[in-house]
Amino acid sequence: MKKGLQILLVGYNANDAERIGAALSLGGLTARWQQVETRTDFLHAVKHQHPDVIISDHGSPILDGFTALALTKERCPEVPFIFVSGALGEQVAIESFKQGATDYVLKEHLEDLVPAIERALRRAEEWGQSKRAESERDQLLQELQEALVRIKTLSGLLPICTLCKKIRHHVDGWQPLEVYLEEHTDAIMTRELCPECIQKISPAAVASLPFYPNAMPPVVGR
């Protein structure tokens, strides 16, 4: 867990905010905390302060906890969201977790807050690692699919002219063999002469033929 956590407190009065801050210090957690009460201030803090943990009351009349939770899931779903509130009914607590709350701590037991934060941050780190692994997997799958597409362009029936050896492409029509291969593979074509063909033509004719600069020069006269 990194040092100097940024914690956002939502919907607390000054007394409750001080109590939470004291509980963080007593629990040995090094943290800076910021208190917000309105939706506007909350959205501004999430965007510009990038909190590591969000702690919210349930019953704030200005910005209630469920609204703050929904905004967190919309704007920064990777940030742990912990309710620190008074005793509520079991159904409300269950609904909190259903909507995505990371944990729930009672104001009467603030000694449980730091352990809850530590658990939440471990889960967030595991979630981040899982998302990174998923992203890397998706990238690999995309690269494999693209490779398969390239391979498929050279599979199946490949019409080739018996005389001039041009390839018939379903979009571009008839193309020289080297043009087709350069467009559909990673190969770079060079023009050379095999030993059999060299023997069939004169040295003057060989000299007049076009060769790419990196091609091996033909050896004439063997």
Image: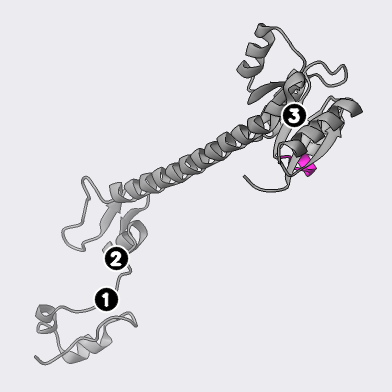
| Among the 4 quarters of the image, the one containing residue 108 | top right
The residue sitting at 26% across, 51% down in the picture is 154
Mark nearer the viewer, 3 or 1: 3
Q: Which residue is mark 1?
A: 191
Residue 125 position within the rendered picture, expressed as x and y whole percent measured from the top left: 56, 40
Residue 151 position within the rendered picture, expressed as x and y whole percent measured from the top left: 29, 50
Q: Is residue 143 above or below residue 200?
A: above
- Which SS class for mark 1? loop
The residue sitting at 43% across, 43% down in the picture is 137
Q: Which residue is mark 3?
A: 55
Circle 2: is it few (<14), some (14-19), or many (20+) Cα within 10 Å? some
Amino acid marked by disc 2: Glu
- Which SS class for mark 3? strand
Which residue reaches farthest right?
14
Comparing 143 with 83, the one in front is 83
Amino acid marked by disc 1: Arg
Pick whichever of labels 1 and 2 is earlier in the sequence.
2
Q: Do the residues under discs 1 and 2 have CB atoms within 8 angstroms?
A: yes
Circle 1: is it few (<14), some (14-19), or many (20+) Cα within 10 Å? some
Magenta part of the protein: which range? Answer: 46-51
Amino acid marked by disc 3: Ile
Give the left or right position of residue 61, taking residue 85 as reference.
right
Comparing 66 with 208, the one in front is 66
Q: Do the residues under discs 2 and 3 have CB atoms within 8 angstroms?
A: no
CA gap, disc 2 to disc 3? Answer: 66 Å
Determine if the magenta segment contains residue 138.
Answer: no
